[in-house]
Amino acid sequence: MNTEHRWHILAVGLILCGALDAANYTYPLRVGNANPRILVDQNDIPFLMVGDSPHSVFSNLTSADAAVYLADRAKRGINCLWVNMLCIRPVEGRPDGSLVDGAKPFTATIAGTTYYDLTAPNQAYFDHIAEVIEMAAKDGIVMMSDPLETAGWLPTAVANGPARCRAYGRYLGKRYKDFPNIIWLHGNDFQKWNVPSNDAVITAVANGIKEEDAAHLHTVELNYQASTSLDDPNWAPIIGLNLAYTYYATYAEVLHGYNQSARVPVFMGEANFEYERNGDEDGGTPHVLRMQEYWTMLSGAAGQLYGNKYMWRFLPGWKDYLESPGIVQLGYMAKLFQARKWFKLAPDQRHAFVTAGYGHFISTGPPATATTARFADNDYVTAALTPDGTLGMAYLPQGGTITVAMSKLRTRVTARWFDPTANSFRTIAGSPLSNHGTRQFISPGKNSAGDPDWVLVLEADGGGRSMAQPGAGFPPR
């Protein structure tokens, strides 16, 4: 039985149940052989990264509260989490980096300094991390684990030097190599990665891990406001995933990463968080979050991480924000793509598919149009098409009219508008449509949330569905 047919059968059962269940994947993940732009599990099942960013889950939650959080995210279809193994400020940990129970991460400091000695790990501290990773494994969640995040711990790494950092990496690699649900994620607001002494100590941690653990993928987050892992050539031999980082228009940075390498999948590691606002951005309103998400998925990404102000810090009352508009609508996005051959979509960079009405591409700076500085007014339409012409999709962040080259599709086309705020479809008049010539599509106006954004979904005789029988998945509405 070939890989795609196995995937079809799995998708039938899972999607009919309402969502892809992360517990059905066999970890660890790896880069696809047939398609190295995506991640797959050990059975070659395509893995769409749908993640959250609870950076301080190890340090700020008890085991019991971590279990509550993990169970909630699992039931919402979240399949990976960015977590920091060490937390101080500014990642909302305590000044000594201790756990809730007071356990410190290391048992000694470097002589004559106040910096922890990275070669003196406290077993009780790292046992707690192991416990939470094991709980996540039972929920089918991959822990994207940052061993020494650089926003807070870079001075400690520099004080330790490359040799100690490499030894720390070897300790982590040996301690966690048998946990299947891990991806190693380095950096974090790594603003000064281009200083050789800084890069040397963080790459030393990664190389130390790789000495003991050859099974797990690595990635790194570099600098804001816009970067990808491969911007730093020192990381190219280490990483298997290219992390795009931007608080500007996500399509620009994801496409930058997509075009850097055809053999290293790109994903959106960090963009605007729900309930937060930074500098010149509009912040994480539901509309902005949807723009980020659909722009990302139609620009060639292997997936993305969402973020929530209350969850990355676990602020008082965080449980009241578990079911937020952002996480609910992220689930709608995930189900839309998981029900289709998302892993075959290629971004329409030359506008051969959507030929007109695609708006303004903003490559740098705040994601504004030519006349406004507001993120939420950015009008760029991202589109993608499968090589066999069975599935074409376009995201219209401001609605409007686009022109589509119907001849790019294989056969007659089922045409629908997807409302990303209601998880519902509207069939377009005359569907199924001819696949000849060009055709204009006018979005339906306001969606159910009163915003202008819609997703155009064109499927050639159901061929874009990632399941055995066409018509399964979302009920027609």
Image (spheres, grey):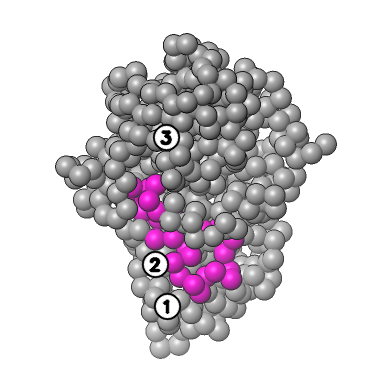
Image: 63 above or below 352: below
What is the x, y in percent for residue 12? 69, 25
- Residue type at the position of mark 1: Asn
Q: Is residue 397 above or below residue 431?
A: below
Q: Residue at x 70, y 49 (%)?
A: 34
Identify residue for label 1. Answer: 198
Residue 242 part of the magenta segment = yes
- Name which residue lies at 32% across and 58% down: 225
Whether residue 277 is visible, yes or no, is no
Q: Which residue is mark 3?
A: 354
Earlier residue among tags 3 and 1: 1
Q: Are marks 2 and 1 in contact (CB under 8 Å)?
A: yes
Tell me where residue 77 appears, x and y as whole percent: 55, 34
Counting from the top left corner in percent of width and height, residue 131 is at 62, 52
Q: Nearer the viewer, residue 52 or 419?
A: 419
Q: Amino acid at mark 3?
A: Val
The magenta stretch spans which residues? 227-253
